[in-house]
Amino acid sequence: MFSKFTSILQHAVEALAPSLPLQEDFVYHWKAITHYYIETSDDKAPVTDTNIPSHLEQMLDILVQEENERESGETGPCMEYLLHHKILETLYTLGKADCPPGMKQQVLAFYTKLLGRIRQPLLPHINVHRPVQKLIRLCGEVLATPTENEEIQFLCIVCAKLKQDPYLVNFFLENKLKAMASKGSADVITEDMIRGQDSSTTDMGQPIQPEEMPSAAGVEQMEKEDDLPQQADELSFSLDELNVASSPESSTIGPNQDYNLVNSLLNLTKSPDGRIAVKACEGLMLLVSLPEPAAAKCLTQSTCLCELLTDRLATLYKALPQSLDPLDIETVEAINWGLDSYSHKEDASAFPGKRALISFLSWFDYCDQLIKEAQKTAAVAMAKAVRERFFIDVMEPQLMQTSEIGILTSTALLHRIVRQVTSDVLLQETVYFILGEHREPETLTDINRHPLRHRLIEHCDHISDEISIMTLRMFEHLLQKPSEHILYNLVLRNLEERNYIEYKPFCQEDKDVVENGQIAGAVDLEEDPLFTDLSPDNTLSTQEWLSPSPPVSPEHQKNDGKTEVHKIVNSFLCLVPDEAKSSYHVEGTGYDTYLRDAHRQFRDYCVICLRWEWPGSPRPLEKCNLEASFFEGHFLKVLFERMGRILDQVVGDLMVRIQRIPDFTPKLLLVRKRLLGLEPEGPIIDHMTLLEGVIVLEEFCKELAAIAFVKYHASSTP
């Protein structure tokens, strides 16, 4: 109470006293702080019971005022005094000892405000960046301390300053630089260069550029001003009495402490306070994006960043329930790593394991965004670590297991990861994990070269429909990703030789097949009653179609292309008998809907393909090995086999079966409306599986017909 009264009295005296020049005022406040340590006899009283916080705040206000009164970039006498007399070094020493109790918080706050409020660059000064380095090491040492908030604020302001001037990061690469320099790296700053400085340079308060720093092994203690030697000796003696000693800078540096800014942030990401952890993640996001190659190399090779990312991914993945509903995994709300807040009590759609699932997806989103923002070499290193330490070590055994429940859950999680990943580098490693890196044509004998790829493709035709559908959906989203390797690995590597063509010269027998450019028995597209919903109002204009594909090779001219596409489209649309069709009874489910969707997908994927610089035309047939046996590849083989069975099971005896169902057409229409949400759920209808299968088959055939027509139109439009 007496201390607070003294502080109030001092403020009143200062307010009534005549104003002093800024430098005298600044020195006065600093002397008041040093006198406390010389004269105090009670080092247990908290710092808030002293005048120290007030003096520090006044010093900061003076520095800001001085800068505002001077021209931009000019260093004033108060700032020169702070630099010349190593005030930050002294404050660091006091903060490290936390003397009086709470002093560490005050020092952290002073450093943070100084770096944040002063516009001129301070970090290049050795008497700034060296104590800043030391203070960084004190951050994150112990979690859940009273100083955590001040620690993260301090670290984040340092990160922000490095983001503004990335070259400054070289001041914070400590031990690693010495090791690099010993190997003869000409473009790396040595540890001696960072630590050394000519005293005359600091006397003037001039910043040191990394390439200009002398190679002195240490810094000579600067001479004190004439009126300060006795005070300095007394302060030094007082600090010794309080056991506040500044250890040599290199004595605490361990193998993984050469980028201490990263290590302190990594420690704080483990804070039980979610706000502190998120701030630490934001700081790391700034650091990984710095373009300095030396910092990127140090970041991934000499810190635990990669281990932290992957170990936490593994821990959160293993915390998930063994069984999760695939629908829950797919529909859980979009995850943003910075907003990982969830209350089970407030969630009306809660399900067992939702908290754990959100935590896992949130951390994966952070890893994805971190790699997306990172400098290139750092991004590659982190993505490879995710592949090796998480995908292969943790996820692959789950995907390769034999338990159907386990397969379904792990495949649904893989599907969610494929949908969620946005970083090109992490996407590439995800693709390599799923498909492998092979690019040569497949053969039947080597389809098991990448076991996970083989297993996932086999799961597309699994005895469990749930597993098959989930795996197919995973591949569907994978094929939509902007990665050339996906399409090439699954399909195109088996087609380059074009040995799928039965190539033979045109002969007389072919003339009997074609009559006036029309295949015998073919129905013209415009006259076909199946295309009644292709009215002028709902067809696409020529301008809406994509520009034409590259011209085909001379030996593959399509004089009868229109006839061929009519034949193909008709073959799909006629597959389901008219008696089993129901889409023409429901508005908005016509063939034109599929045409527009197919056109949009085709156009979007063509835009993606442009970046891959594929050849403009296929390899000429004379340069292809047409004698080699054709194998479409494991992926297409499984899909074709599955499709063939679907057609056999539904169309083979469809007409016979539907004739046995009373009121077939009304029931079929009712099921369609229920599937579309146009009718509420009601009593169970007999033969529901068959009715749903007929509807799905009709829609599937319309989609295939639309794809065929869109591809033809795009390649033939002038």
Image: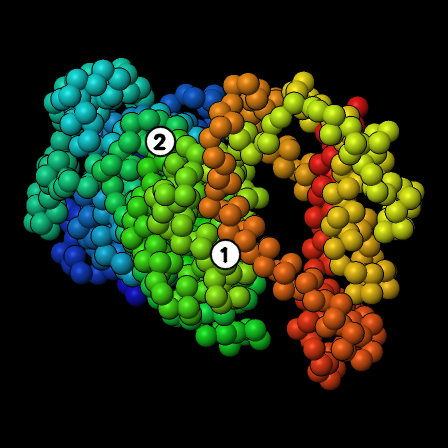
Residue located at (13% from left, 22% from top): 182
Front disc: 2 or 1: 1
Q: Secondary structure at mark 2?
A: helix
- On the image, which quarter does residue 49 sit in? bottom left
Q: Provide residue 377's location: percent of width, then percent of height.
A: 35, 31
Q: Is residue 429 in view? A: no
The circle on residue 377 is 2
- On the image, which quarter does residue 680 sit in? bottom right
In-front residue for pair 35/97: 97
Q: Residues within 10 Å of mark 1 (few under 14, many from 20)?
A: many
Residue located at (56% from left, 73% from top): 349
Q: Provide residue 117's location: percent of width, then percent of height.
A: 43, 37
Q: Secondary structure at mark 1?
A: loop
Question: The disc labelled 2 sits on which kind of residue?
Answer: Thr
Q: Earlier in the sequence, mark 2 or mark 1?
A: 2
Instruction: Name, please, the residue furthest toward the bottom.
Output: 683
Mark 2 to mark 1: distance in Å?
Answer: 36 Å
Residue located at (79% from left, 65% from top): 580
User: Which residue is identified by label 1?
Assistant: 460
Q: Quadrant of the N terminus?
A: bottom left
Q: Provide residue 490's location: percent of width, then percent of height.
A: 49, 41
* 93 with respect to 107 (left or right): left
